Image (cartoon, rainbow, N blue to C red):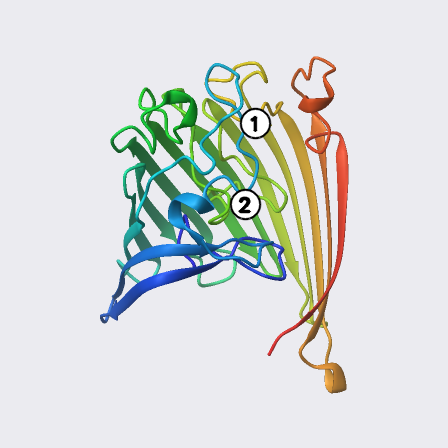
C-alpha cells in the first residue's frame, strides 16, 4: 500500500503491512483505487492488529487539557474505506484525489495538483489541500479516551516550487496546518504526505503549524551516486499549548543528508546508504527533559546496506 495516509513509511527494513480488499482500475489517462482494510501490522512490529487496536501502539501524546491520552485499546472501529484516483490532465499535469473514511472515528480528504518537470531546466510546482472531520465522537464518547476530539476539525494546505538544472534538483516547500485543530493520522499507518516531509520528522499531532523546507538532490552521471540535502524550519505552537501540540514538541530546525551508492558488477543489486539528520530547538522547552529528550538538540546516524531484488 502506498497512499497519502497509509503507506510503507520511511527508513524501515520491515514496512507497514495491511489486510483487506483492494482494487485498481486503469484507464488511458487515469488510475482509480478502492478498498476496505481491517487489519494492520505497523512497521517495527510482527503482530497483526484490528483497526482500532493499531491506533496507539506508538506514543499517544496528550489530551487537550494536558492529561495523557487514553485512546489506546479504547476505540471502536471496524475498518478503513479508501477511494482514490491518479489523473493525468496533460503531459505535465497530474491530479491526485483521495478520501479515507475511518469508521466511527474520522474522515480525511486529500487533493493535490502537480506540474511535473519532464525536461531539464524546467520549473515544476505543486499544491495540496487536506480536510479532516470527526465521525460520531471520534472513537469513544469519553473525551479523555477519544482519538479525534469532536470540538476540532483540520485544514492543511501546502505548496512547492522547484527546478531541475542538469544533475541538480532544487525545491522550496511549504506546509500550513491551521488553528482549527490538530492534523491527526495514526503514525502506525504511514508517514505524512506533506511536501515538507523529511526523514526523521513528523508533523502529525499539530495544529497552527508552519513548515518551510529547502531540498536539493544531486545525481551523478559518471557514478551510480545520488546525494540529497535539506534544511527545514518548523514553527509549532508552544509546548504547553496542548490543544494544538499533542506531543509537547518545541519549534525546531532540521538538517538532513542522504547519500546512496549503487554497487555494480559482481555486487550489482547492493546499495550503500548513509543518513544523518540533526534537530535544533528554536522554541521554548522550559528546560524540562520531556520537552527535548529524543526530540530536539539531537543528531541521528544510519548506515544501511540494501539489496534490491
* SS under mark 1: loop
Q: Quadrant of the N terminus?
A: bottom left
Numbered tag placed on residue 247 in the rendering: 1
Q: Are marks 1 and 2 in contact (CB under 8 Å)?
A: no
Q: Nearer the viewer, residue 42 or 53?
A: 53
Q: Is residue 117 above or below residue 108?
A: below
Residue placed farthest to the left in the image?
27
Residues at marks 1 and 2, CA–CA distance in whole angstroms:
29 Å
Image quadrant assignment for residue 270? bottom right
Question: x%, y% of residue 263?
Answer: 73, 76
Q: Quadrant of the C terminus?
A: bottom right
Return the disc, 1 or 2, that comes first in the chain's sequence.
Answer: 2
**Disc number for residue 65:** none
Q: Residues within 10 Å of mark 1 (few under 14, many from 20)?
A: many
Callout in the foreground (1, 2)? 1
- Residue in the foreground of this view, choosing between 188 and 271: 188
Mark identifier at residue 171? 2
Question: As rendered, which of 26 and 230 lies closer to the eye?
Answer: 26
Residue 205 in sight in this render: yes
Question: Extreme front residue here?
Answer: 73
Element on which disc 2 rests: strand
Please report the residue visible at 30 percent of the width from the left and 48 percent of the height from the top: 78
Q: Report x, y in % for residue 299.
A: 77, 39
Amino acid at each position: 500500500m502506498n497512499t497519502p495516509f497509509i503507506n510503507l513509511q520511511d527508513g524501515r527494513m520491515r514496512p507497514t503491512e495491511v489486510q483487506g480488499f483492494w482494487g485498481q482500475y486503469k484507464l488511458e489517462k487515469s488510475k482509480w483505487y478502492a478498498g476496505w482494510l481491517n487489519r494492520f501490522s505497523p512497521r517495527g512490529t510482527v503482530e497483526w492488529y484490528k483497526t482500532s487496536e493499531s491506533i496507539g501502539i506508538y506514543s499517544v501524546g496528550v489530551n487537550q487539557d494536558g492529561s495523557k491520552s487514553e485512546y489506546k485499546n479504547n476505540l471502536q472501529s471496524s475498518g478503513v474505506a479508501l477511494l482514490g484516483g491518479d489523473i493525468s490532465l496533460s503531459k505535465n499535469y497530474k491530479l491526485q484525489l483521495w478520501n479515507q473514511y475511518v469508521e466511527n472515528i474520522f474522515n480525511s480528504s486529500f487533493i493535490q495538483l502537480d506540474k511535473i518537470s519532464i525536461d531539464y531546466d524546467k520549473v515544476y510546482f505543486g499544491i495540496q489541500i487536506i480536510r479532516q472531520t470527526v465521525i460520531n465522537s471520534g472513537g469513544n464518547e469519553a473525551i479523555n479516551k477519544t482519538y479525534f476530539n469532536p470540538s476540532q476539525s483540520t485544514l492543511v494546505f501546502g505548496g512547492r516550487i522547484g527546478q531541475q538544472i542538469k544533475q541538480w534538483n532544487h525545491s522550496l516547500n511549504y506546509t500550513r496546518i491551521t488553528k482549527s485543530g490538530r492534523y491527526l493520522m495514526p503514525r502506525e499507518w504511514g508517514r505524512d504526505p506533506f511536501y515538507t516531509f523529511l526523514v526523521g520528522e513528523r508533523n502529525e499531532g499539530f495544529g497552527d503549524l508552519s513548515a518551510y523546507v529547502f531540498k536539493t538532490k544531486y545525481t551523478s552521471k559518471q557514478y551510480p551516486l545520488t546525494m540529497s540535502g535539506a534544511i527545514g524550519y518548523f514553527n509549532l505552537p508552544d509546548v504547553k499549548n496542548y490543544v494544538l501540540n499533542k506531543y509537547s514538541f518545541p519549534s525546531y530546525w532540521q538538517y538532513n543528508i542522504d547519500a546512496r551508492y549503487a554497487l555494480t558488477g559482481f555486487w550489482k543489486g547492493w546499495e550503500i546508504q548513509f543518513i544523518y539528520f540533526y534537530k535544533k530547538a528554536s522554541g521554548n522547552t522550559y528546560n524540562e527533559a520531556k520537552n527535548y529528550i529524543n526530540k530536539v538538540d539531537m543528531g541521528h546516524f544510519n548506515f544501511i546496506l540494501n539489496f534490491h531484488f
